[in-house]
Image (cartoon, rainbow, N blue to C red):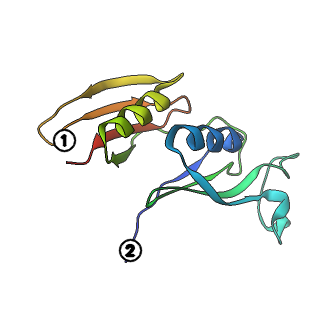
Amino acid sequence: MTKIEPYLFANGRADEMIGFYKHALGAEVPMRMTWGDSPTPNDWPMPAGWAAKVMHATLTAGNAQLMISDGDSDKPANFNGFRISLALDGEANVRRAFDALAVDGSVQMPLSPTFWAPLFGMVTDKFGIGWMIGLNP
């Protein structure tokens, strides 16, 4: 089976992002490795003082997986040109995730019924990640 999974480079804010998604999506973190944990730390470029920053983390929420890294740059991250689509069971789950992701972010389309989903909305979270959130029919 082939999977396409988002991999977000947070450029220094990975632990903040991980904590936010744990709360907003009920995500679990089965794997988190820092740059300092790498068996070959000199093989990867990283800003000075980044030994405790996240080299790789895997988050799971239901059967979905999201990967996050601080990347190799301390420049601000840019998340333009895409959105992550999230389909959930149960209206309460959709509303909870939408409201949590909207905290300190912005709503582009409030939750409402559409012709393709009984409930759908679009939000950009505080990290600049765009989300499309819908209720499974």
Task: Residue 64: give x, y in percent of width and height.
Answer: 44, 58
Quick check: 41 above or below 62?
A: below
Q: Residue furthest left?
A: 115
Residue placed most toward the observer, 55 or 1: 1
**Which residue is depicted at the point 44% across and 27% down?**
99
**Lateral position of residue 122 relative to residue 31, left or right:** left
Check disc 1 and report the residue beneath it. 117
Is disc 2 placed on a helix, strand or loop? loop
Query: Which mark identifies residue 30?
Result: none
Residue placed most toward the observer, 43 or 15: 15
Check disc 2 and report the residue beneath it. 2
The residue carrying pointer 1 sits among few (fewer than 14), some (14 to 19) or many (20 or more) residues within 10 Å by Cα, namely: some
Is disc 1 placed on a helix, strand or loop? loop
**Location of residue 131 (image quadrant):** top left
Task: Name the amino acid type tagged 1.
Answer: Ala
**Lateral position of residue 76 relative to residue 125, left or right:** right
Residue placed most toward the observer, 7 or 89: 89
